[in-house]
Image: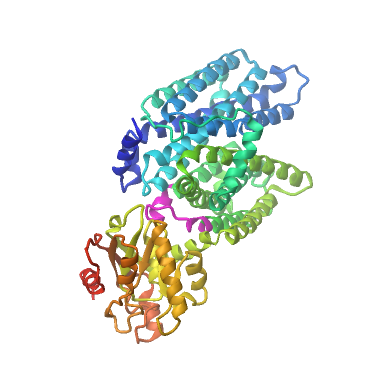
């Protein structure tokens, strides 16, 4: 399959994220990555439990269990530091489906060796093979996240990432549980040996059906020095501000996730007095939360990459992390409880919901960030950027472990550790959103159209996915630009009257979104000329520019005459024109309706608003009157 065929598959885009699971461009890839995560965790958890209960017996008898456990964790994560940069280059250079099949074949070989080591009980060989599993995961990560944008369209990125994230965490959960169950049996090592080989073979078989995905940079010369390439990779990511801070945001999520996943078993035992069944119950709620949050992202974002969900996720992570600390029992029973006894405790439901919502808001947080990296990165560099992301992820997970060791060693309880990371999360969020105000701006827009208004969208597909165009729309309220920005998938440069542009609070949103302030010819001729120059440059850059040709808000609910400024814009830079109409905003609190403000507020809460987009207009000579006529056809009085 060549690049043209890959592009063709992206044209057959679906509005239902689960429909992706019926299509060859996604299903074999999804099964392959799911089985890989599943097998990883069967192997890892079986080995950890084997070390815990048989470590001394199967080693030389002198090595401590703690040393073997920490050695295993360190060896698994070490390849991410050493080989990620090289892996990113290798994936960018080669055809991806073939690369994935090679990686899965590598997994089969490793698992055959692991099966033999489990069978004979050679624990040092198993630990060495864990390093090779880390290497295999290091190779697979860049392939996984760079494959998605080559086969999914812009409206499917969030859906694809949501399915991958939810599937990965479900695979982690059931793989961890199955590894523990199998190794605990009378012939546990033999069963683990069989299962890991079968899963590896199934994963390789699934990879055979992944469609060809051509390299976007086949002439790339690989730098085999991992240290210089790692440094160059980090410097490259740092050059794109939003991508770099998105990488840091994802890595911070893994810092939080590692803290919760590692400490939750001991928290359950020491703070809640729960046994292994309660640990499994809470881990299940955490995983289901992440899965639900990931899948809900596609619906909440309106099938577009929505950075506004990231602050929403941050808020939930901190609030429910703090409440998990507050919900801890004052006195824990002396004997460990099972699930039934735990459910009878006063705060058990609250704790379960806290764990679930930490996972849920984690899903809201992580999926848009991955989608944003895929959208904003140069396609031919994406694998290397994902590889750099893996380096940062590994570093933050190590920092999580170090912080936990230091704080717990200083006498801090695990519940107190949870509240510390929740507060740290709030501080990190504020810092990142200060550096990238676009995230917080999009959050304000997202809250507006999901709380105050119920917005229906019609004809959004009439807006081209790339290239310059002018959107023309009627002007009904002070928040017209925010509603349009929240609905349209592409970033828009709005041209707006300077007095609206300078409104308190909204000015932050408009300025961050790159709005263009304009004044009338007799009010401020210099500002007007500056605005027309900015519009011309934006269109030459291939941006979408939205104009309200009436030049003012309606004071009676009816459209005013379109001003000739739109003709000047199109005469200077001829581009497609797309008529739009906002219906249902007249009479709301943000309009100039003369009715009582209290009545307008009551009427406006969850009022139904429609954004209607007509097909693009092709005219030899575009006039203001002709465009007004086109907009009037879709305006509902």
Q: Which of 364 and 536 is in front in this view?
A: 536
Residue 400 in the image: x percent, y percent? 67, 43
| Residue pictured at 47% horizontal, 61% vertical | 442
Q: Is residue 146 above or below residue 55?
A: below
The quadrant of the image that shows the C terminus is bottom left
Type of colouring: rainbow
Q: Quadrant of residue 54?
A: top right
Q: Using the image, determine if residue 145 lies above or below residue 121.
A: below
Indicate the position of residue 139 as horizontal and vertical percent values: 53, 30
Determine which quarter of the picture holds residue 426: bottom right
Q: Nearer the viewer, residue 585 or 228?
A: 228
- Whether residue 522 is visible to the viewer of this picture, yes or no, is yes
Q: Does the magenta stretch include residue 69?
A: no
Q: Does residue 429 lie above or below 43 as drawn?
A: below
Name the side, left or right, on which 203 lies relative to 330. Answer: left
Q: Which residue is drawn at 47% across and 23% down?
A: 102
- Residue 527: x and y in percent read 46, 76
Magenta extent: 295-312
The image shows residue 595, relative to residue 252, as above or below, that is below
Image coordinates for residue 104, horizontal then vertical, percent: 47, 24
Q: Can residue 394 be seen in this view?
A: no
Q: 11 or 433, which is in the foreground?
A: 11
- Was residue 298 drawn as part of the magenta stretch in this picture? yes
């Amino acid at each position: 399959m060549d690049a043209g065929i890959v592009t063709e598959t992206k044209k057959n885009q679906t509005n239902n994220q689960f429909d992706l699971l019926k299509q060859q461009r996604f299903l074999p890839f999804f099964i392959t990555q799911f089985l890989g995560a599943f097998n990883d965790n069967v192997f890892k958890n079986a080995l950890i439990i084997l070390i815990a209960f048989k470590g001394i017996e199967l080693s030389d008898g002198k090595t401590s269990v703690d040393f073997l456990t920490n050695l295993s964790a360190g060896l698994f994560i070490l390849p991410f530091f050493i080989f990620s940069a090289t892996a990113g280059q290798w994936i960018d250079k080669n055809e991806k489906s073939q690369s994935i099949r090679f990686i899965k074949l590598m997994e089969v070989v490793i698992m055959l060796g692991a099966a033999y080591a489990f069978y004979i009980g050679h624990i040092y060989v198993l630990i060495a093979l864990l390093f090779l599993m880390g290497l295999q995961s290091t190779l697979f990560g860049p392939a996984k996240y760079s494959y998605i944008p080559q086969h999914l369209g812009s409206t499917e990125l969030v859906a694809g990432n949501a399915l991958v994230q939810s599937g990965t965490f479900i695979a982690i959960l059931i793989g961890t549980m199955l590894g523990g169950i199998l190794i605990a049996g009378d012939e546990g090592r033999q069963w683990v040996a069989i299962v890991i080989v079968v899963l590896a073979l199934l994963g390789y078989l699934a990879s055979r059906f992944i469609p060809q995905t051509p390299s976007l940079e086949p002439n790339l010369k690989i730098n085999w020095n991992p240290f210089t390439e790692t440094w160059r990779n980090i410097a490259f990511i740092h050059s794109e501000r939003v991508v770099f801070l998105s990488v840091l945001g994802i890595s911070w999520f893994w810092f939080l996730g590692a803290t919760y996943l590692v400490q939750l078993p001991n928290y359950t035992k020491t703070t809640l007095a729960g046994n292994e069944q309660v640990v499994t119950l809470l881990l299940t709620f955490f995983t289901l939360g992440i899965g639900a949050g990931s899948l809900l992202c596609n619906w909440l974002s309106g099938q577009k990459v929505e950075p506004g969900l990231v602050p929403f996720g941050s808020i939930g992570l901190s609030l429910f992390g703090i409440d998990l600390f507050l919900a801890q029992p004052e006195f824990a029973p002396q004997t460990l409880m099972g699930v039934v006894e735990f459910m009878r405790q006063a705060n058990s439901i609250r704790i379960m919901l806290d764990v679930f919502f930490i996972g849920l808001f984690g899903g809201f947080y992580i999926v848009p960030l991955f989608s944003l990296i895929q959208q904003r990165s140069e396609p031919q560099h994406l694998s290397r950027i994902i590889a750099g992301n893996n380096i940062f992820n590994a570093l933050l997970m190590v920092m999580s472990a170090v912080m936990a060791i230091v704080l717990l060693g200083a006498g801090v309880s695990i519940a107190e550790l949870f509240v510390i990371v929740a507060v740290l999360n709030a501080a990190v969020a504020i810092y990142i959103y200060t550096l990238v105000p676009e995230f917080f701006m999009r959050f304000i827009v997202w809250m507006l159209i999901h709380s105050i208004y119920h917005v229906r969208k019609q004809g959004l597909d009439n807006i081209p996915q790339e290239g310059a165009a002018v959107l023309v729309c009627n002007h009904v309220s002070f928040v017209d630009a925010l509603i349009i920005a929240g609905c349209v998938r592409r970033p828009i440069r709005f041209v707006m009257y300077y007095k609206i542009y300078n409104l308190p609070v909204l000015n932050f949103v408009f300025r961050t979104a790159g709005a263009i302030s304009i004044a009338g010819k007799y009010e401020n001729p210099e500002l007007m000329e500056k605005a027309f120059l900015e519009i011309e440059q934006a269109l030459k850059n291939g941006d979408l520019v939205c104009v309200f040709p009436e030049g003012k808000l309606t004071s009676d609910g009816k459209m005013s005459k379109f001003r000739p400024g739109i003709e000047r814009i199109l005469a200077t830079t001829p581009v497609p024109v797309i008529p739009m109409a906002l219906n249902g905003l007249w009479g709301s609190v943000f309009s100039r309706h003369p009715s009582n403000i209290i009545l307008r507020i009551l009427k406006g809460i969850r009022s139904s608003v429609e954004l209607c987009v007509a097909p693009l207009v092709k005219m030899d000579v575009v006039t203001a009157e002709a465009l007004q006529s086109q907009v009037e056809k879709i305006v509902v009085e």
